[in-house]
Amino acid sequence: MSEKTHWKKMTNPNYMGDYSIPEGYDLIATIDYVAQEKVVGVGGKSEMEVVAHFSDGNKPLILNKTNMKTIQKIYKTPYIEDWKGRKIQIYYDPTVKFGRDTVGGLRIRDFIPAQKEISLICSDCGKSIGPAYGKSAEWVSMYTHKSYGKELCAVCAQKLKEKLDASKAPDPLNNKKEENV
């Protein structure tokens, strides 16, 4: 699987950001625990932030007040200990503002995610799709579905990519040297 690197991924790759979710998709994640912890940001500045950690291999998400209020609303509890094991649906919202600037950011849907999730079984080999390339199994499944039209494990996705790349034969007209007549 070939993927371009968003510049924001380089700013704090330890946490989920808007680059973490494929365009047009939501990510369903299961909260393992929420805690206040020191987060080191750009330029080495550290701040205490509320961070949600997930049990399904996703990177942690720094929670802002809007997202915490959404979790409280959908699960009807303000207590972070009660959020353990709860699923949230995260999406990219391009209208999120920081100060006066519209910067985009991650938001949590204001409803409990449906129990039906995307398949985590590879449609080629039949094995479970696991985390790969620093991404969760759900992300790999979503990405391969978007890229190849079916859910694939990382091994089968790489094989399919190589097969597709090999089938792109070079154009013989562009590779011929002109011959003197």
Image (spheres, rainbow, N blue to C red):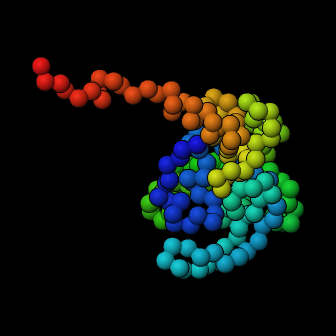
Q: Quadrant of the C terminus?
A: top left
Nearest to the observer: residue 155 or residue 88: 155
Query: In the figure, residue 54 lies in which quadrant?
Result: bottom right
Q: Is residue 89 visible?
A: no
Q: Identify the residue at horizontal 61%, vertical 78% (top origin).
A: 47
Q: Identify the residue at horizontal 72%, vertical 45% (top origin).
A: 138
Nearest to the observer: residue 145 or residue 181: 181
- Residue at the left extreme, as displayed: 181
- Residue at the front extreme, as displayed: 181
Q: Identify the residue at horizontal 49%, vertical 49% (top origin).
A: 4
From the viewer's perspective, is 53 left or right of 10?
right
Q: Residue 178, position in %: x, y?
A: 19, 26
Q: Residue 110, position in %: x, y?
A: 72, 48
Q: Is residue 113 visible?
A: yes
Question: Is 72 above or below relative to 42?
Answer: above
Question: Is 8 above or below relative to 45?
Answer: above
Question: Is 158 above or below relative to 174?
Answer: below
Q: Identify the residue at horizontal 68%, vertical 43% (top origin).
A: 154
Q: Residue 5, position in %: x, y?
A: 50, 53
Nearest to the observer: residue 9 or residue 158: 158
- Residue at the top extreme, as displayed: 181
From the viewer's perspective, is 48 left or right of 118?
left
Nearest to the observer: residue 177 or residue 144: 177
Query: In the figure, residue 18 lies in which quadrant?
Result: bottom right
From the viewer's perspective, is 145 left or right of 111?
left
Query: In the figure, residue 177 lies in which quadrant?
Result: top left
Q: Residue 111, position in %: x, y?
A: 75, 45
